[in-house]
Amino acid sequence: MRPTFLRRLITLKENAAMAWETLWVNKIRSFLTLLGVFIGVVIVTAVASVLNGFRDSVVDQVQAFGTNNLYITRYPFANRGRSDRSLRARKPLALEDGWAIRDHCPSVELVAPCLAYPPWLTAARARGEAMEGPALRGVFPEVERVLCAPLREGRFFTAVENQHRLDVAVIGHQVAEALFSNRAAVGQEIEVSGNRLRVIGVLEKYKEGIVGEANHEDSVIMIPYGAFTKHYPWADDHFIAVQARPGKLASAAEEITEILRRRRKVKWDEENDFEIGTASSIIATFDQILFGAMAVMFILSSVAFMVGGVGVMNIMLASVKERTGEIGMRKAIGARRRDIAWQFLVEAMMLTGTGGLLGMLFTDFLGAAVRLAWAELPLSTPWWARLAGFSGSVSVGLIFGIWPAVKAARLDPIAALRYE
């Protein structure tokens, strides 16, 4: 180990020991000073913990439907503002679009077009029990494989049942609980928006959301596409789920884009009038939304850091004035300017760094208490939030401690020794 590095390490250790002694002697003043930094770190880590847990929950729900799937819709998956006229003017996706993808895209394995009935117009009833707003969909049997729909009991409808437009249904866990809480659902009849359907299957319960709310897919009622068009012939806006062949997700997306642009007569210099999403792209879109929330979080934490920084500067300037005699004595026995400057900088960084550590510990304690009271809430503090909180707190001490440190280093030793 080089002598110069060793000497600096020893000096840093001595400065840290003196800084800690000074902070411990003035406990109340030190605590009030680091309060702003403490609040800033709590904001960073607590909000990041909630948002990261929310993201993990969304990722789990999206990936539950398959990571090798593509989802084709008329409108964007996430509306981040008021839609313009060009979006509203997009024509619906047709059933023939789905079959064109199936027949002309070699990288595609399965295609499952789907139609949906407005949930605010849907109601389901069975023997005196009722449920408002289930998600009624007309689907093909392939949807069971494309969307990885796990059955708890019963079976999925067949291609023959779809061809003959039979009134059968596969219902979600929440629908079964609402209508058949005390008896088996398979074989029972339900009435959905005036049409009677026979239940032939019940789906497994999907993972709950971040705050314990039921997964939207648990309230689904799936019926054969043929039966859906029989009862609702006016429905024409399709959602198309596609399963790509293994390792062919990117090429499948390119092939689908080419087919749909040609079928929908999109000019070469125009953007797509449809959206193609994958699990990764949907998560990326969600991340962009979270980024805005993160930006607001950092702005709020920066305000708290600024308040804490001003307090640190004030207390360090007062400390320089109180310890003028000590500074003069150190200079008289050979301390250099940079030694004095580093002494006060280390003290300022230790003060704010302690505030950062206390903020992270408080956030962990708060998270543990919240989980005890609300077990369904998945809190997960990411490493970057801890790093940002601690490094931000130390940086506040470094930045706002520079002026007091420079002022202490520039004191004249003779004038400092005479100061009372």
Image (cartoon, helix red, strand yellow):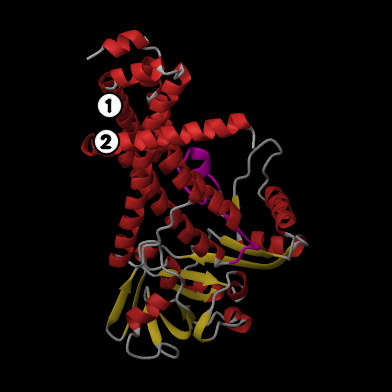
Query: Do labels 2 and 1 touch, CB within 8 Å?
Result: yes
Q: Residue at x 61, y 79 (%)?
A: 163
Q: Quadrant of residue 350?
A: top left
Q: Which of 32 and 205 lies nearest the eye of the viewer? A: 32
What residue is disc 2 on?
A: 30
Quadrant placement of the N terminus: top right
Q: Is residue 62 visible?
A: yes
Q: Secondary structure at mark 2?
A: helix
| Dot 2 or dot 1, earlier in sequence | 2
Residue at horizontal 71%, vertical 38%?
268
Query: Is 207 placed left or right of 313 in the picture?
Result: right
- Residue sticking out furthest to the right: 106
Marks 2 and 1, how far apart at CA: 8 Å
Placement of 96 over or under 152, stated as above or below: above
The residue segment tinted magenta is: 66-90
Q: Position of residue 306 (x, y in %)?
A: 34, 29
Q: Nearer the viewer, residue 55 or 255?
A: 55
Q: Secondary structure at mark 1?
A: helix
Mark 1 residue type: Ile
How many labels were placed on the picture?
2
Q: Is residue 129 above or below residue 111?
A: below
Residue 201: horizontal and vertical position, in percent? Answer: 49, 84
Numbered badge on residue 315: 1
Q: Is residue 200 left or right of residue 243?
A: left
| Image quadrant in which you'd find residue 368 | bottom left
